[in-house]
Structure formats: structure tokens, C-alpha cells
Amino acid sequence: MFLLEDWLRERGASTNQVLASIGTLSKSDAVIAYCSAMDGLGTAKSDLDVYVLCDKVPTAGDTGFFNERLGTITQRTTIESLVLDVEFWPWSATEAVIKHLRPNDLTLSEVEMSFLARLLSGACLWGDQECENLRELIHAANMTDYAVNYYLLLSNSDLEDALAFFDEGDYRSALYPATNAFYYAMGANNAKNGISIFKTKWITKIFLENGSKRFIQAYHDAIIHPLHQDNIGERVESLIRFAQDLNSASVSAFDYEE
């Protein structure tokens, strides 16, 4: 079982130091800390992401970054060898993001989806009741189905392009969208298996550690063999077939609509 306090201690830090680095907190605030190790990912040098949900965010200052669209402030600080990325989110912006968490909406950005997923996975450092209420809202919105449909949309969109090029015999042009469809299909399958992590760099690792043996073998057949001039068409066909089969297996309870 992952314990944040133990992980912080190994980095020469503590939860009290993390909270002290944020500044003054009110009773209505919530603080959730997340690191990739909570999901069995990342490295020993991974940063700690700290999400502060509050009524009013502080000013960006000289070292902060202001996201005008979301109204958030991100500040970077350190505790010994640990790097902290502290994001201040207004409650109003957080609630607005959750309202869009509908499988037939699919308008949220990767940043917003990662934010919600990390609120679920992270450790609550401040405002236990606020954290609990927040997580109930996210669970009620059904992130799993949203994640499945999100990746299906991306995969099927690239599949259309890949098939169009493939049917014309333009295998070089088909290779890029076919590869994208291939990876997004794995993202949909990961989500269907209950792992909604919206960082594309982790898609392959999660799939290979949690996917079915049949599809893992299909992955090896499609991607492991060396690519050269004479087998581009075969590679594209394998990628397309893999994405189509995996997407069919990953269709959520909601109808997929592009």
C-alpha cells in the first residue's frame, strides 16, 4: 500500500512541510497531493503535484503561471530534493470542469481530465469533508465512461484518416494516423479496465501491465518487428486491425458518437 508520508520522508520532506509551503489555508479549502507512484508509475525523481482548491486563488507573482482560461495559478517550489508543482484552482472552475464530465460531451482538455483523475487518486492533506464531497461528485459523473469515449473518439478519428490513405495505397501517409489510432485504442482499453490516467506517455506501460494476453500478443505482432521499406503496408494493416479490434472490445455503456 502506498503511503505518501513514507514517500515524502524518503525525499527529505513531510506533509506538514508541503502544507506550510502553500501558505494560509481556510476551512473551506481542500488540498490534494498526487505523485505518479500512487498509480505505480513515475520514477524516484518524480515531482509532487499539489492541488489547492479555494474560493480565491493568490496572485501569480514572479514565479507563478496564470492560466487565463481556467483561472488557475501554478507555482513551483522545492523542499530539499523534492520539487512541488502547486496548482491553485478556484472552486467555481473545479465545479465547472466536473459538470462537463459527461460521456457525450468530450470537450475537456487533457489538463482538466488529468486534474480530475488526480483528485481521485491523490492524498487529501487538508479539508477531509471537502475532499470527500468533491470525490463523490466526480464518481457520480462516471469518469470511466468519459475516458473510454474520449480515447475512442481520438482513435476512430485517426483510423478514418489511416484507412483513407491505406485504401489509396499511400502507406507512408497512413503510418502516422494508424500509429496514433493504435495508441489511443490502448488508452480506451486502459480506461475500460478502470485505469483513467490522462497522460499519453503512460499508455503503453499501463496496457502491457494490465491488458489481456490476446491483445498484448497483438501489440507485439503489430509493433515489435522492425519496420523497413518493404513492410510498411503490412505494418499499417496490423496497426489498423489492432485499433479496430481493441476499440470494439472497449466500447462503453454509452453509444459512441463522433
Image (cartoon, helix red, strand yellow):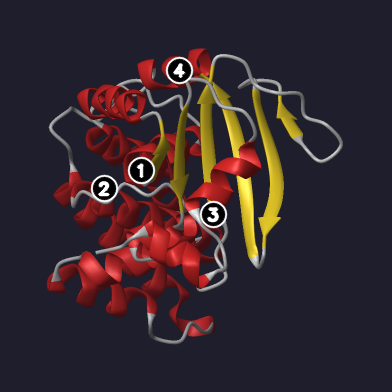
Could you tell whether 177 is left or right of 184 in the image? Answer: right
- Of the numbered discs 3 and 4, the one sitting upstream in the chain is 4
57 lies above or below 46: above
- Looking at the rendered structure, which numbered label has been put on residue 48? 3
Q: What element carries label 1?
A: helix
Label 3 or label 2, whichever lies nearer to me, is 3
Q: What element carries label 4?
A: loop
- Residue under the point 57% across and 59% down: 47
- Looking at the rendered structure, which numbered label has been put on residue 28? 4
Could you tell whether 18 is left or right of 33 in the image? Answer: right
154 lies above or below 229: above
- Of the numbered discs 4 and 1, the one sitting upstream in the chain is 4
Residue in the foreground of this view, choosing between 22 and 56: 22
Three-letter code for the amino acid on which mark 4 is drawn: Ser
Q: Are discs 1 and 2 less than 8 Å apart at CB?
A: yes
- Residue under the point 83% across and 31% down: 61
Cα distance between the residues tagged 1 and 2: 9 Å
- Of the numbered discs 3 and 1, the one sitting upstream in the chain is 3
Cα distance between the residues tagged 3 and 1: 26 Å
Residue in the foreground of this view, choosing between 125 and 112: 125
- Of the numbered discs 1 and 2, the one sitting upstream in the chain is 1
Expressed as whole percent of the image width and height from the top left, the position of residue 168 reads 46, 54
Could you tell whether 71 is left or right of 18 in the image? Answer: right
Q: Residues within 10 Å of mark 4 (few under 14, many from 20)?
A: few
- Looking at the rendered structure, which numbered label has been put on residue 191? 2
- Residue under the point 19% across and 68% down: 215
Label 1 or label 2, whichever lies nearer to me, is 2
Locate the C terminus and report the quarter of the image it occupies. Answer: top left
Cα distance between the residues tagged 3 and 2: 23 Å
Label 4 or label 1, whichever lies nearer to me, is 4
